[in-house]
Image (cartoon, rainbow, N blue to C red):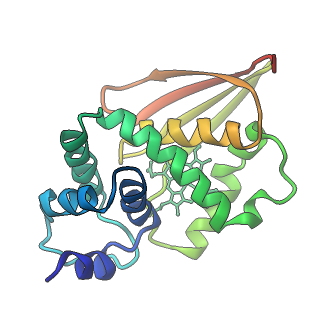
Amino acid sequence: MPIEERVAADMKGIVFTEFLELIEQRFGLEIADRVLESTPLASGGVYTAVGSYPHQELVAMVCSLAEITGEAPADLLRTFGQHLFGRFAALYPAFFHGVDDGLEFLCRVEDHIHVEVRKLYPDAELPSFEYQHEDDRTTILYRSRRHFGDLAEGLIRACLEHFSTPCHVERTDLDDEGAEVRFELTPADRS
Ligand code: HEM
């Protein structure tokens, strides 16, 4: 089956399609094709979970793009997070209404935004976030069996930029695999 058909038929998740979109935009169609061609499809292109993206294949594509471009997978995932946040803003404007602060938005992801996402896409593969507030510091604990700590970092930084909320972001990896990551956010001077 041609690659385009496999993509259209089986890889419907926004995370997956937006990653392809980013490769095309940033590196061109030829590299996007090479990445797809060099990515082994574990299940032979047949998936039962309609609507969800095959996570391991996204990881394989990130690694393949890293090999082709010489950029580190972690950097590519962070860049992808930046791109993805822009797409969320374009595709889901309702989540942005009435929110004018990046920290406030980030604190709405677990109990509001992803809850709504799950209603729209019951088989969505979503991480969990825990929040703690102490003085002016907000701590966000990311956990996911998909190990996308780098993607979360890109999304968090893009969110703060989007709302022009100046913040220092300090990241601490709580395991070796990006499955559990603590982000400590403290307000920074605008100057
Ligand atoms: C309007 C805003 C947002 C929307 C609509 C949204 C929606 C989604 C959707 C649809 C997925 C993919 C689910 C799947 O493919 O099965 C996803 C995954 C994810 N989201 Fe959100 N999201 C939003 C904001 C955020 C923000 C601000 C963060 C960071 C704090 C975040 C962190 C993540 C991560 C890291 C994943 C990847 C899956 C994982 O790590 O397990 N999202 N989100």
- For residue 48, say whether it is visible: no
With respect to residue 43, does 105 lie above or below?
above
71 lies left or right of 82: left
Q: Position of residue 35 (x, y in %)?
A: 21, 56
Residue beneath the point at 18% across and 58% down = 34
Q: Position of residue 81 (x, y in %)?
A: 50, 45
Q: Quadrant of residue 3?
A: bottom left
Residue beneath the point at 16% across and 58% down = 39
With respect to residue 93, does 25 lie above or below?
above
162 lies left or right of 75: right
3 lies left or right of 141: left
133 and 86: which one is in front?
A: 86
1 lies left or right of 129: left
Residue beneath the point at 19% across and 43% down = 68
- For residue 69, say whether it is visible: yes
Residue beneath the point at 73% across and 64% down = 93
Q: Quadrant of residue 11?
A: bottom left
Q: Position of residue 92 (x, y in %)?
A: 67, 66
